[in-house]
Image: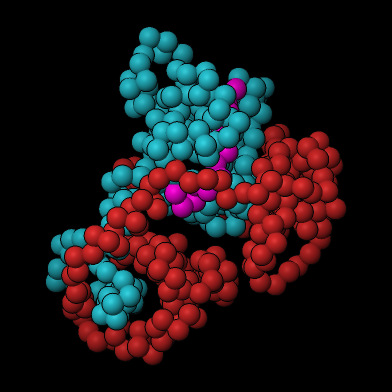
Chain colours: A cyan, B red
Amino acid sequence: MSDDGHRGAEPSPIERRVDAIESLLVEKGLLTTEVVDAIVETYEQDVGPLNGAKVVARAWIDDDYRARLLADGTAAIGELGFGGPEGEHLVVLENTPAVHNVVVCTLCSCYPWPVLGLPPRWYKSHAYRARMVREPRTVLAEFGTTVPDGVEVAVWDSSAEVRYLVLPERPDGTDGLSEDDLVPLVTRDHMIGVVR
Amino acid sequence: MGGMHGFGPVEPEAGEPVFHEPWEGRVVGLMIGTGAAGLRRGSIRPAIERIDPATYLASSYYERWARSVEAGLVGAGTLTEAEIDARAATGGARPARLEHDSPELVAPIRAFLDSPQPTSGAPAAGAFAVGDRVTVRRMAPEGHHRCPRYVRGATGTVARIEGAWPHPGDDRPEAVYSVRFANADLWGDDAEPGSVTVDLWERYLT
């Protein structure tokens, strides 16, 4: 953990409070700084949307995997080695020519951490949480996403125990691409559903 | 907060970092680390929901987490508010941290965060089946629950049944239904076309 951004600056009240909690826990021998560092590093470096992209790319090239993924998301995602907190019950929502899926949590910010990492700020914003359930096409347009009129926009409010991952449609013109070539085509926003 | 007006546009941030400030990462580390070590009482969300509404709306996401972590630590008797106040008041310098070599603690945390787990759900044996029409009860419960206000009183269709989970604050697993509502049944005749599917415990439904 670098302090570079704060050298010479007065810490804010929240920084002081968080530092106070951590240092008290460490001094009492209840927690180590290393454990907190490991958690930060895991979400900064190891667990993020690349995991989800690998799941999607596998589903695009392997129909049997796709079938398992749609039948039992938790188990199929586990086949690729992914799982953990906020991934205890994963459901994969398949986009089709007739249905476009998009995920929100109106109560807090439930999000499938093992496949997407921690949520971006906009996903946690009051605006997204309030509006996506009421005017999804308008919100999608703010992301530059237009869903044709004949396609149903299906919004999923993941406020209980299920965590959802959207399986986007495989883009046209990618038939010759390998699994590794497909992975970079899949973004976090595709897997939340704000991009089609 | 589903359906509320007046928050303006959604504003994505290009190239957004996982954490905007180092303290945000520390909060996540403390939340997971103290939870895994059994140092906190209660789960993260009930404590967040006890924050008064004005403070809630004025706080950032990780500020709310920090409050919740603190409330859980104090509630469990791990720390006292007085000692946190005293330490936070001690001045401008960041408190010195004791560095430990603790691979025996780090390895299980990493494995916990990044390895496959069996599903948390139990098989559901509930009153409703896929395709049933169900109506969300009108209610105004105090305390933690997971029934969004905007679906109360609305009628929808059971689309999926993923399993049974304990209702928050309850040990008894109860069926959870993914209930699909037509947008017009939530927002009126001038709603955008489409649907919203919400996961609801059986006790919320008739």
B140 left or right of A164 in image: right
Q: Is residue A196 above or below residue A111?
A: above
Task: Name the quadrant containing residue B26.
Answer: bottom left
Q: Quadrant of the N terminus of chain B?
A: bottom right
Query: Which residue is found at the position 44% from the left and 49% from the top?
Result: A84
- Is residue A146 at all visible to an observer of this figure? no
Q: Is residue B134 above or below residue A152?
A: below
B114 left or right of A45 in image: right
Q: Position of residue B39 (x, y in %)?
A: 42, 74
Q: Position of residue A187 (x, y in %)?
A: 40, 33
Magenta part of the protein: which range? A84-96
Q: Is residue B149 magenta?
A: no
Query: Which residue is found at the position 28% from the left and 46% from the top?
Result: A45
Q: Front-most of B200 and A131?
A: B200
B59 left or right of A11 in image: right
Task: Name the quadrant containing residue B130.
Answer: top right
Residue reaching furthest front?
B104
Task: Name the quadrant containing residue A16.
Answer: bottom left
Q: Is residue A68 above or below residue B67?
A: above
Tally the numbered discs: 0
Q: Is residue A95 magenta?
A: yes
Query: Which residue is found at the position 65% from the left and 54% from the top?
Result: B165
Q: Position of residue B147 (x, y in %)?
A: 70, 58
- Is residue B133 at all visible to an observer of this figure? yes
Query: Which residue is found at the position 65% from the left and 49% from the top?
Result: B122
Q: Is residue B151 above or below residue A101?
A: below
Q: Front-most of A57 and A27?
A: A27
Predominant secondary structure, magenta span: loop
B11 left or right of B149 in image: left
